Amino acid sequence: MKDELTKSSKRNTQNPQIIALLTDFGTKDYFVGALKGAILRVNKTAQIIDITHEIAPQNIKSAGFTLRACYKDFPAKTIFVAVVDPGVGSKRRAILVETKDYYFVAPDNGLLSFIFSETKGFRVFELTNKKFFAENVSATFHGRDLFAPVAAHLSNGIEPTECGREISDFVFFEDNKPRKINKSEIEAEIIEIDRFGNLITNLQSADLPARFVLEIGGKPIEKLQTYFAEAEKSEIFMIFGSAGFLEIVAFEDSAANLLRAEIGRKITVKSR
């Protein structure tokens, strides 16, 4: 697998390299602009794409879900810079993850756990080669001074092995899987709430029986729709979202508000 990864890391540097950004910085302050400027100082031809900068502050798991939901939509060899970093300036490490198809630059705080659980072959490098950092590294802005420059140097064609030593003791959160209670019941939970108030669960089609009812806060939900407009306004139902997870939604309304639900709320699935 390592030989395959080495071959896959050979880039076509004739084309602008895509660097995709995901942070909790918001857009009110200078942070995102500084991040992009740091990339362009190293590679003026880099193609920078914003995934989002509206992750809830310090919400590592939300960042991981969001990246997981969209990274496969990008072309092969895209470099992802994911910065949700409450441990910035501490002893937490900075890492680069190389898979067969993509590169991820992020803090070693569990944000990339989905890569470690879903990808069969990958390598993880601790970022220690200061040659690829900014000249002056702020203890509070590693996004600008460390992650962005490393990504830009990668886009210029350096090898991951130049960035630091390969490690195997990276931070990894176990995937939050539904739990089987008995033969007919499954306990799951809400792992994300999008801006429309849709409740994204950790249930995928393989976890579910052919016929089932979902309960949240004692309220049963039986309808599983194909698209939103099949329902009446404010009607609560289930749908498989574009990220592949079962969602609890309300047509033209917020299921989160109607059900007073939050991330981490437990739900029950019962066979019918």
Image (spheres, rainbow, N blue to C red):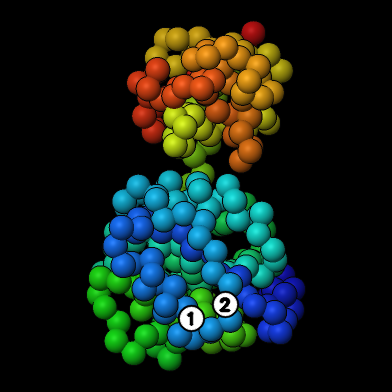
Q: CA distance from mark 2 to mark 1?
A: 7 Å
As drawn, is 169 to the left or to the right of 245? left
The numbered disc on residue 46 is 2
First of labels 2, 1 by sequence position: 1
Query: In this view of the protein, which residue sits in the foreground, 27 or 108?
Result: 27
Asked where in the image residue 214 lies, by quadrant, the reply is top right
Where 218 sits versus 141, above or below? above
Regarding mark 1 in the picture, which secondary structure is present there?
helix
Label 2 residue SS: loop
Q: Residues within 10 Å of mark 2 (few under 14, many from 20)?
A: many
Q: Is residue 127 visible?
A: no
**Residue occupying the point 66% across, 24% down:** 227
Which three-letter amino acid code belongs to the residue tagged 1? Leu
Image coordinates for residue 152, horizontal then vertical, percent: 51, 80
The residue carrying pointer 1 sits among few (fewer than 14), some (14 to 19) or many (20 or more) residues within 10 Å by Cα, namely some
Q: Residue at x 61, y 23 (%)?
A: 228
